[in-house]
Amino acid sequence: MNSMLLRLVISQFKLFFREPGVVFWSFGFPVLMAWILGIAFASKGEILRNVALVSNNQASASTLPEWLLQKTGMAPAEFSGDYELVWEVGENHGEQARFRFRVMPEKAAMLALKRGQITLWIEGNPKTGLRYRFDPNNAESRLTYLLLERAFRKQKFVRQKAEVHPLTMIGSRYVDFLIPGLMAISIMNACLWGIGWNLIELRIKKLLRRMVATPMRKSVFLLSHGLNRMILSAAELLLLYGFVHFYFDINIQGSLQALALVFLSGYSAFAGIAVLISSRVQNTQSGNGLINSVTLPMFILSGIFFSYHNFPDWVIPYVEVLPLTLLTDSLRGIITEGIGLAQVIQPALGLLAIGGICFALALKLFRWH
Amino acid sequence: MVIEVHNVCKSFKDVNAVRNVNLRVESGEAVALLGPNGAGKTTLVEMIEGVQLPDSGTIQIFEKTWAKDEHFLRQEIGLALQETRFQERLTVEETLDLFASFYHLGKKRTSEVIDIIQLESKRSTWVVQLSGGQRQRLALGIAILPSPRILILDEPTTGLDPNARRDLWEILEDFKATGTTMILTTHYMEEAEFLCDRIVMMDQGKILAEGSLNQLLDKFGEGDLIEYVIEGSFPTQEAKALSGVLTCRWNEDTGYGRLIVNSISETLPDFLDLIKITAVSLTSLECRRRTLDDLFLAMSGRHLDE
């Protein structure tokens, strides 16, 4: 019995270590991800929390109010911009928080909130009382509020009780931020798992090899996979939209043509990536690892569940060109901000370019046998 | 000439899978590539099928090459690769319909093929629910869908039980009668004998011998076999002196011996007399024609089913 168990365990170890791809995705990839994400975020200190100071007064719309400058102890020269200030508070490690304040009118604050560029906004002043505006269902906003209020209190700043005015208007809620991201994930998964994984399986079963030994055109074969998943993905999105429309009152504010363009370009980008990923993989473990290596970073970085504007500034330009970010931002813009065709052309072209480059590379690399 | 393979070589890392092979196949001919595992049969047929490229040498089919006329050749060749797993949750009919579409064929042809491969009762059954023999028949059905002028089958009956193998042979025999040129690889000598006009014996990437069964046996396998097991001391010298004996071997430890003789009817009576006179105990006796396996053993030192 013991000998049998030992032999079984040893033979499984041998099989595992004799597949270099499997070893890499099991050991190398998690360490690599930890290293990359660790370098990207852990060493750069606390998350930067973006807060808007709403001022509808034209005269003060671009300058930080005196009360904030006094309490943060900063001179105007230390601002990173005319109407922007970064304030680091907290002495002990666990208490540290970094806030970035921006002064803007209410309309701009609402737009910034929808885009995830701020997590809450403050109205009023300490004399008359501060009002915090955010969706209490958004955990990030709630935490920012708690940290900010504590920081103000520690500075003996706010004597009057602050008020919280929950933002529950359609379009400004956390769920309005979340749903476009979930739609983008649905498109990404439909492609990477639906197309990429399928192609890998067909290769492993040697069915790919059998099919190309007929007069079937390779381009038609790949196109069929793309079309099939596109129809399924569109159906998935319709179902999801139907649900959130009736359950959360979410409506598409922008143009349907823009939505169609973004869907098609986003789908093309991920379909291209899927074919590229699957172009040479010979076993399921490597396929699994490779797909995860593409989806996982984008899941974290692309602002699906929380805004990527909280990340360090140097990361943001890279995050903004990730296909999932381009897709999510465009969908969010169309659904919650009501943007039209003109505003999505640039990201759509970016997505189409990503898809085209990946697909062209995949055709060069694709292993049919 | 339908297929002409000229000085073809193919290597994988440090293995020379096919070494300088020449093969010509006439129209309507049925050729078996016979050899044990690792003989290079699959590599050779996959190069003929255009699935692999040779390292050197040329392959011409209908005087065309894969490099220039792939689309034409794909229409003309039906093939069944080793170990193809079709989509498990498509039915027999759906699978055939799918492949029929690659050849621009309609439903009518699918129905004809289902009849030919005798899977009428399984028409709506998922592939995952088919037996091994039924799956091989489906693979054969896909191969014959386009009514190909050349049919190439790579070990079509490996792993099947004798009944399933016999069923497949009958279908192939009917198909052969239509005049289709056929190449099949196998390590079953009976399959090669039953289905093919010409047998090409391969080992270690080379062709050892080729010809019809009778040609091979006449050329390389002269004589019939008398095999026996004897308890006691066998008179080898006396046996060698019997009329019509070509060679005589006997192993004292196992008691197994074999005589290769000109004719069983000529030698057997004398052999039995000798046994009677010497009063040894004969526990087993088998008389038969020499087979391809005997030939292969003599040429390569290996059995076909190794």
Image: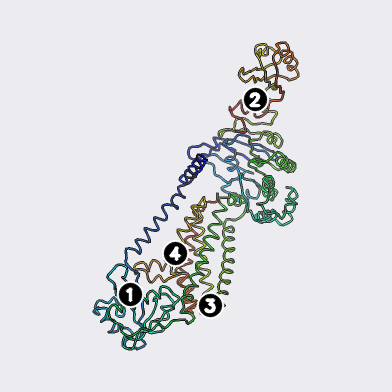
Q: Chain of mark 1?
A: A
Tag 3 subunit: A
For the residues labelled 1 and 3, the Cα–Cα distance comes to 31 Å
The residue furthest front is A1
Q: Position of residue B120 (x, y in %)?
A: 75, 51
Are discs 1 and 4 located on one and the same chain?
A: yes
The residue singled out by tag 2 in the image is B220
Mark 1 neighbour density, 10 Å: few (under 14) some (14–19) many (20 or more): many
Mark with earlier residue (1, 4): 1
In the image, residue A40 lies at what x, y percent? 35, 63
Q: Secondary structure at mark 4?
A: helix
User: Pointer 4: what residue?
Assistant: A298
Mark pair 4, 3: CA separation: 26 Å
Q: Position of residue B44 (x, y in %)?
A: 58, 39
- For label 4, the crowd category at 10 Å Cα-Cα, with few meaning under 14, some 14 to 19 and many 20 or more, is some
Q: Look at discs 1 and 4 and give the one toward the viewer.
A: 1
Mark 1 and mark 4 in contact? Answer it, CB < 8 Å.
no
In terms of sequence position, does the residue under pointer 4 or pointer 3 come before the other?
3
Between B93 and B208, the one lying in front of the other is B93
The front one of A117 and B267 is: A117
Question: Please, what is the three-letter code of the amino acid marked with disc 1?
Answer: Phe
